[in-house]
Amino acid sequence: MRLNSTSQRLLITTTLWLIGGSSIAKAQTSNADIIRGMSPDKKYGLQISCSSYPLDEKDIDPSLITAVKLVALPAKTAVMDIGQSYSGSAPELVWSADSNWFAFSVASGPRVSDTYVYRRLDTGFTELKPEDLRLPIEGDVRNEYVTPMRWLKPGILLLKDAVIFRAGGEATYRFAAVFDKKGDKFRITLKKKVGSKAE
């Protein structure tokens, strides 16, 4: 049976209303927990707790976020608290292929972000404490943003270091941090300047 144009419009309007109504109702739900950033083995994920369901799970309004935790799946058992940026946004986890290492970047202010690294041991995940996981850069640096890109292999993390100088201009570098067996020390390799801009 073919629908006339009036029936077609009514069907489309009703469908859109149902979809929109469902989205609005979902957005008004309180205490929503979003899981993202799962480990390759699917045993862990980043749980972002929100005061209400976000309109976009991939771009959550920081004002909605009430807590960010690493959880064990599928039970969603809290493993540890994860830091948030000064703006309240949740970080993106970068996992190694064996799910034993992860890293993320957190901005402590508008001019700086740091990378944090964790390793899974028998007792759980342990934060590594490498001093200054960044490049020694010549010049008077005003802003510096260090972010993890990917794990080249377990224990070898590729990072990006983007800087803005007080005198003007900016530069971007890539480097690899190779962690030792204990994970508390590292050496920098593969340092490469990949971009610059003068003012």
Image: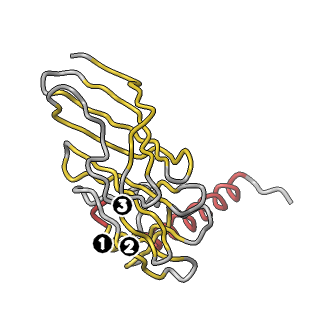
Q: Residue 78 falls in which quadrant of the image?
A: bottom left
- The three-letter code of the residue at mark 3 reads Leu
Residue 121 — which label?
Answer: none
Q: Disc 2 marks which residue?
A: 49
**Element under label 1?**
strand
Task: Point out the tag, 1 or 3, that comes first from the N-terminus.
Answer: 1
Looking at the rendered image, the disc whose residue lies closer to the viewer, 1 or 3, is 3
Q: Residue 161 falls in which quadrant of the image?
A: top left
> Residue lying furthest front in this view?
181
Q: CA distance from mark 1 to mark 2?
A: 6 Å
Looking at the image, is 39 positioned above or below residue 106? below
Q: Disc 3 marks which residue?
A: 128
Q: Position of residue 65 (x, y in %)?
A: 32, 67
Looking at the rendered image, the quarter that the C terminus falls into is top left
Q: Nearer the viewer, residue 156 or 184?
A: 184
Q: Is residue 110 left or right of residue 192?
A: left
Given contact means CB atoms under 8 Å apart, are the residues at marks 1 and 2 in contact?
Answer: yes
Q: Is residue 132 left or right of residue 172?
A: left
Given contact means CB atoms under 8 Å apart, are the residues at marks 1 and 3 in contact?
Answer: no
- The three-letter code of the residue at mark 1 reads Thr
Q: Position of residue 52 (x, y in %)?
A: 37, 73
- The three-letter code of the residue at mark 2 reads Ser
Q: Residue at x 31, y 67 (%)?
A: 64
Looking at the image, is 126 positioned above or below residue 159? below
Q: Disc 1 marks which residue?
A: 66
Q: Residue at x 22, y 21 (%)?
A: 169
**Element under label 3?**
loop
Q: Residue at x 44, y 74 (%)?
A: 33
Q: Residue at x 13, y 27 (%)?
A: 166
Looking at the image, is 136 positioned above or below residue 130? above
Near mark 3 (Cα within 10 A), the count class, few <14, some 14-19 or many ≥20, is some
